Image (cartoon, rainbow, N blue to C red):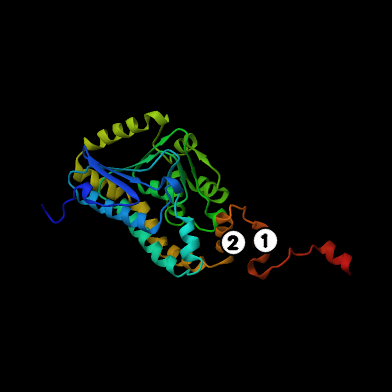
Amino acid sequence: MSTYSGLPHKSFRFKYILYEKKRWTAFITINRPDVHNCLNLESLRELGAAFEDAAWDDGVAVVVLTGAGNKAFCTGADLKEWHRDFLPNPGDFHKWMGVFIETFERLRNIGKPTIARLNGMVVGGGNELQMSCDLAIAADDVYIRHVGTEHGSVPAAGATQWLPLIVGDRRAREILFFCEKITARKALEWGLVNEVVPRGELDEAVERMVHKLVKKLPECTRYTKQQLNFWKDLSWAMTIGHARDWLTTHTGSDEVRLSIEAFMNKQPVDYERIRRTSGGVRTAPETQKQRKKKD
């Protein structure tokens, strides 16, 4: 066996993901259904290891990425981890973000076609994860949503870079500013997914797509993928380092702290309070009519 061969999937002892290889396909499942398959540090590291193995295994032609259960594909970063680790030590976010970036880059540069099997809600970094895949098939009852501007983050690990390429500038702004749910049907209409099927037909649809991809030339497919990645790679390379530093710097800010604490306490964010206190503004500015009354 070559040093650069894949290992038997059973040799991995993953805690937060499931990994299986069969019929020219690597199946990778985020296995944290109790927290809607959100991503903590260890799950990111495990995903990175699985992506590397699938890339090195010549017996793998296609990679299918999904989430455990039927409620969530992935809901992005683990906010409980943020609350525990980064609010008291904001500088540590820079280290976490480094692992996040490496994991996503391994997926995008895996050298083989990748399919996102969208089995449940796709939120925040979960949408950035599925956009890192080449193709996506969704069950008809799922939705896609970003929540960064509601919950104290900036979706700059793929969304700000790639959504304008995929759905267009105005729709990207709508998705990221409003933080509203995008139904599977609307996602299909906007080009955010390739196919929408009834939930009971999801695995069959994925299998059909895998079969089409296996019946293609591996080297030609790999280089076609590399060329198609150009605009994604360019926008990513020009912005991700800056985003990592900005997010680290602002992890200790009032906006992030108050938003994360509201999430942890299952309370709405007091946006008016944040607006009044940001930049040293403690009260809403007086109107000219109010000032005349005082005089």
- Residue 250 position within the rendered picture, expressed as x and y whole percent measured from the top left: 52, 66
Count of marks placed on residues? 2
**Badge 1, how many Cα within 10 Å: few under 14, some, many 20+?**
few
Camera-side residue of 291 and 128: 128
Q: Amino acid at mark 2?
A: Leu
The secondary element bearing badge 1 is classed as helix
| Residue in the image at 42% along x and 61% along y | 239
Quarter of the picture holding the C terminus: bottom right
Provide residue 20's location: percent of width, then percent of height: 26, 43
The answer to whether 255 appears left or right of 199 in the picture is: right
Residue at image mark 1: 273
Between the C-alphas of marks 2 and 1, the distance is 10 Å
Residue 26, disc: none
Q: Quadrant of residue 200?
A: top left
Q: Which residue is mark 2?
A: 258
Residue 78 location, x and y as percent?
45, 55
Q: Earlier in the sequence, mark 2 or mark 1?
A: 2
122 w.r.t. 290: above or below: above
Looking at numbered disc 1 in the image, what kind of residue is underneath it?
Arg
Query: Crowding near pointer 2: few (<14 within 10 Å), some, many (20+)?
Result: some
Q: Nearer the viewer, residue 96 or 267?
A: 267
Q: Is residue 148 left or right of residue 50?
A: right
As drawn, 5 above or below 144: below
Kindly indicate whether the residue at mark 1 contacts the one at mark 2 (C-beta within 8 angstroms): yes
Could you tell me residue 162's position as x and y percent?
Answer: 42, 50
- x 51%, y 45%: residue: 171
